Amino acid sequence: MRALILILPALVLTGCERAPMVIFADSSITLPDDPLDLPPGAGVDAVIANCTACHSPSTMLQQPRLSREQWLATVTKMREVYKAPINEPDIPLIVDYLAAVQQGTEGQAER
Ligand code: HEC
């Protein structure tokens, strides 16, 4: 009986050694490519600096079309509710850029 107690763990250990290495399916993940790039334009650098830490371009551009005022409200919400460290002097640049770029996207979608 005592021999069995010694042999069993030994068998288990040997079994482990021969077992194939376990490769977890999710040991590496490939993030999908974002389908959109931020189009060039005045204010794009401000958006990259203040928004892309948390959002992909799609998150910002694939929204219902927003007016300048609505974009301002969204950017203000980012700062006040989500505590996004947005540089205050950049806000008008960001708002103008997003309002302009989004209208372009909307025009294309309607065609
Ligand atoms: C600190 C992280 C952070 C930063 C920086 C940030 N956001 Fe957000 N944003 C969030 C969170 C959290 C949400 C709500 C959850 C979600 O929709 O992903 C959100 C949601 C949004 C939405 C979806 C609509 C809405 O009103 O909820 C838009 C559009 C958006 N952000 C735009 C921006 C823009 C433009 C900037 C740069 C000025 C920005 N965000 C910077 C965290 C951030």
Image: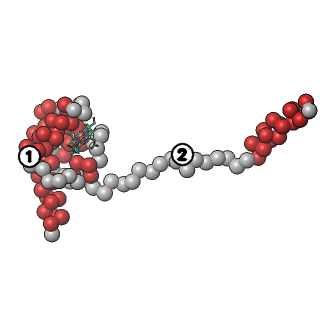
Residue placed most toward the observer, 76 or 50: 76
Please state which amino acid type lies under the numbered disc 2. Ser
**Residue 76, percent from left and from top:** 15, 35
Residue lying at 11% horizontally and 40% vertically, measured from the top left: 72
Label 2: state its secondary structure: loop
Q: Nearer the viewer, residue 63 or 56?
A: 63
The quarter of the picture where residue 111 lies is: bottom left
Q: Is residue 53 above or below residue 24?
A: above
Report the residue marked by disc 1: 68
Q: Whole-percent x and y of residue 22?
A: 64, 47
Q: Quadrant of the N terminus?
A: top right
Q: Is residue 48 left or right of residue 93?
A: right
Q: CA distance from mark 2 to mark 1?
A: 43 Å
Q: Is residue 53 left or right of residue 3?
A: left
SS class of the residue under badge 1? helix
The structure residue drawn at horizontal position 17% and vertical position 53%, both measured from the top left corner, is 64
Of the numbered discs in the image, which one, if any, rests on residue 27? 2
The residue located at (18%, 36%) in the rendering is 77
Say above or below: 25 vs 49: below
